Amino acid sequence: MLIGELARAADMSRDTIRYYVRLGILKPQISAKGGRNPYKIFSPQDLETLRMLRVSQVFGMTLREFQIVRRDAGPDGLSKARRREVIEDRLAKLEAQALVLNDLIRRLRDDLKGGIVA
């Protein structure tokens, strides 16, 4: 599929997809068509990669972390041990963020109770 088709299927902009190509996250086939700007042909696997990327971002993974995990995956995906490691790491980071957020929530509630906010 061409970039426009992939963009629609993934619900992403063409610029975002071009950015992922520049980062090496997507590696489309290059067509002979298009002259100086050859067409990039994307596969169903590229669409699946974008879907996995979206899920990883929901869980707070950076693009760099996504690339590392993806690099570690073999043809059958991540090993059970590596998958466990990734999940444990992500969980620890989310729990740390939750502590910070809970502290901020507590402080805001205290401000409201203390009459700081009119």
Image (cartoon, rainbow, N blue to C red):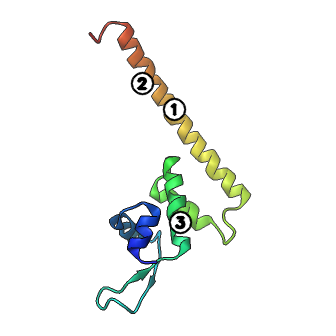
What secondary structure is marked by label 2?
helix
Say what amino acid the circle numbered 3 marks. Answer: Thr
Q: Callout 1 environment at 10 Å: few (<14), some (14 to 19), or many (20+)?
A: few
Task: Work out how far the residue at label 1 is from the one at label 2, CA to CA, in angstroms.
Answer: 10 Å
Do the residues bearing badges 1 and 2 touch, measured as CB atoms within 8 Å? no
Q: Is residue 92 above or below residue 21?
A: above
Task: Work out how far the residue at label 3 is from the one at label 2, CA to CA, in angstroms.
Answer: 35 Å
Residue 110 position in % (x across, y down): 40, 12
Residue 38 position in % (x across, y down): 35, 86
Left or right of residue 67, residue 111 in this image? left
Which of discs 3 and 2 lies nearer the camera? The answer is 3
* Tag shown at residue 104: 2
Q: Quickly name the residue at label 3.
A: 49
Which comes before the other along the chain, label 1 or label 3? 3
Task: Work out how far the residue at label 1 is from the one at label 3, CA to CA, in angstroms.
Answer: 28 Å
Which residue is more in the foreground, 28 or 114? Answer: 28
* Tag shown at residue 98: 1
Q: Is residue 100 above or below residue 32?
A: above
Label count reads 3
Residue 82 position in % (x across, y down): 67, 57
Residue positioned 64% across, 45% down in the render: 88
What secondary structure is marked by label 3?
helix
Say what amino acid the circle numbered 1 marks. Answer: Ala
Q: Is residue 42 above or below residue 115?
A: below
Which comes before the other along the chain, label 1 or label 2? 1
Left or right of residue 35, residue 94 in this image? right
